[in-house]
């Protein structure tokens, strides 16, 4: 952990919303110069604000706690152990989609009884591990998966707490690749199939049928789809109860959107009001599963400018971060605003910022308002705390970038850079497996 020089009073507003600001021309995250982190860590790297994550959680908690709503963090958004530990300390449970995320959550000190296991393709071994650890709930997404849970639970002699995930056939009005609640999407069970399947679950001695789950997509800024989906959940719960089936929990999913363009994020108080109007009267335990909203705006991806070049009158800046480090622009055509680490007079015209990976899709976009850039300058892609490091890879045999957590004037490297030599070691000692299943080491 490294201690840094004092920051002048008034660098941030009293409400703490200015996580990133300039002081004497230097970009700060909280009270720490980003350039000083770069000097220690090297580029590219991710850096997160502990204060920003904490305030996001507390703001959401304040909006939802009057309704008795529990918060489970969607681990897929950012699975760094220090981030999970921070959120767990604040009171969050975890929403996981793999045994790996379960293991990471437990390693971060999260109580298994505060973990919900979602996902359309849980392996039997994953189901078994989750039940043995004593997780709060399994969200089942098909009749076939329910059968698998019954078999595994019977074998283990453990009663499985199960919620059925319904597909409400609601368009989240977001990017097609992150919409999950439409008819034909791979997620959830059609509403018309839920009653019979729920009755089967309730009758099975291996299953504790506890409720209904729903999740319609990610990066929602318009609250209308939530109202539609949650209204359909309420109708379904009433229908199930009219058939004599007990429903005690509702998992409302996540998807709360943040701003990537300087406009407002989703209205969380409006969101809370919708929850109250649609399902608040049902007497169920309520849970939400935000990911991006809690950590997205807390993060930067810091990169160094390598080269400048012209192509057809376009000014191109080649940087050392790439699509393997931040996949969202290539995958979703997502836009992450760029900040200069050293403030300067804005240059007229656009910079097209690209990475070094050998793919035409390794482009972050075109950006105005940046100062004149030169080789060696540092820039930062903002709002990268969610689906940045967690989606990164080693494509082109590139190192996995480190992650840093800032707390005021101090920072901690919470994930060191994984070197290529370490990755090569994974391929040096291997086993050949004969057809009879007997392995021979080499």
Image (cartoon, grey):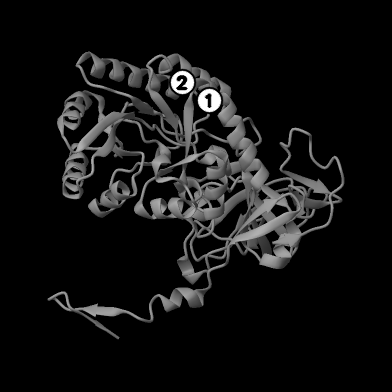
Secondary structure type for disc 2 = helix
- For image coordinates 61% across by 33% down, the residue present is 58
Q: Give the quarter of the figure containing the C terminus.
A: bottom left
Query: Residue 275 — which label?
Result: 2
Location of residue 13 by image quarter: top right
Q: Residues within 10 Å of mark 1 (few under 14, many from 20)?
A: many
Which x, y percent locates residue 249? 35, 27
Q: Residues within 10 Å of mark 2 (few under 14, many from 20)?
A: many
Query: Residue 128 — which label?
Result: none
Residue that lies at the very extreme toward the front in this rendered image: 157
Which x, y percent locates residue 227? 43, 19
Q: Give the side of residue 31 with respect to residue 266, left or right.
A: right
| Relative to 101, residue 11 above or below | above
Residue that lies at the very extreme toward the left in this rendered image: 436
Location of residue 42 by image quarter: bottom right
| Relative to 137, residue 403 above or below | below
Residue highlighted by disc 1: 64
Asked whether residue 309 appears in the rendered view, the answer is no
Tag in front: 2 or 1: 1
Label 1 near label 2: C-beta < 8 Å?
A: yes
Mark with earlier residue (2, 1): 1
Q: Give the side of residue 243 with respect to residue 169, left or right.
A: left
| Relative to 266, residue 130 above or below | below
Q: Nearer the viewer, residue 344 or 103?
A: 103
Q: Give the side of residue 363 with respect to residue 342, left or right.
A: left
Q: Give the quarter of the figure containing the N terminus.
A: bottom right
Q: Nearer the viewer, residue 392 or 230?
A: 230
3D distance between C-alphas at marks 2 and 1: 9 Å
Residue that lies at the very extreme toward the bottom in this rendered image: 442
- For image coordinates 33% across by 24% down, the residue present is 248
């Amino acid at each position: 952990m490294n201690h840094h020089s004092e920051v002048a009073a008034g660098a941030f507003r009293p409400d703490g919303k200015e996580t990133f600001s300039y002081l004497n021309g230097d970009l700060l995250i909280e009270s720490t110069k980003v350039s000083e982190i770069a000097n220690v860590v090297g580029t590219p790297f991710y850096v997160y604000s502990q204060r920003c994550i904490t305030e996001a959680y507390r703001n959401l908690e304040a909006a939802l706690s009057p309704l008795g709503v529990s918060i489970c963090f969607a681990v897929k958004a950012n699975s760094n152990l220090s981030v999970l530990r921070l959120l767990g300390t604040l009171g969050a449970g975890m929403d996981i989609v793999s045994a790996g995320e379960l293991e990471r959550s437990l390693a971060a000190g999260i109580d298994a009884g505060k973990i919900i296991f979602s996902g359309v393709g849980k392996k039997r071994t994953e189901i078994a591990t989750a039940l043995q650890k004593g997780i709060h709930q399994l969200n089942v997404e098909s009749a076939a998966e329910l059968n698998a849970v019954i078999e595994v639970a019977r074998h283990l002699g453990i009663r499985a707490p199960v919620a059925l995930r319904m597909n409400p056939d609601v368009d989240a009005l977001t990017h097609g690749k992150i919409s999950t609640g439409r008819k034909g999407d791979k997620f959830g069970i059609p509403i018309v199939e839920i009653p019979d399947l729920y009755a089967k679950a309730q009758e099975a001695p291996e299953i504790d049928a506890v409720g209904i789950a729903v999740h319609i997509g990610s990066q929602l800024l318009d609250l209308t789809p939530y109202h539609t989906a949650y209204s359909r959940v309420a109708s379904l719960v009433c229908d199930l109860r009219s058939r004599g089936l007990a429903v005690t929990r509702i998992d409302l999913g996540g998807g709360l959107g943040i701003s990537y363009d300087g406009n407002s994020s989703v209205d969380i108080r409006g969101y809370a009001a919708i929850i109250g109007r649609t399902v608040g009267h049902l007497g169920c335990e309520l849970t939400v599963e935000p990911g991006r909203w809690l950590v997205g705006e807390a993060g930067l991806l810091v990169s160094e400018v390598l080269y400048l070049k012209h192509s057809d009158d376009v000014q191109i800046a080649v940087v050392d971060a790439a699509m393997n480090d931040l996949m969202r622009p290539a995958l979703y055509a997502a836009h992450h605003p760029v900040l200069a680490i050293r403030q300067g007079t804005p240059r007229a015209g656009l910079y097209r910022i690209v990475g070094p990976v050998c793919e035409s899709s390794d482009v972050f976009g075109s950006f105005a308002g940046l100062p004149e850039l030169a080789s060696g300058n540092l820039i930062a892609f903002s709002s990268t705390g969610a689906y940045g490091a967690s989606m990164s890879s080693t494509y082109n045999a590139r190192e996995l970038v480190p992650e840093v957590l800032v707390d005021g004037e101090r920072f901690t490297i919470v994930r060191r850079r994984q070197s290529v030599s370490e990755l090569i070691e994974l391929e040096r000692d291997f086993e050949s497996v004969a057809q009879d299943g007997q392995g021979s080491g080499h």
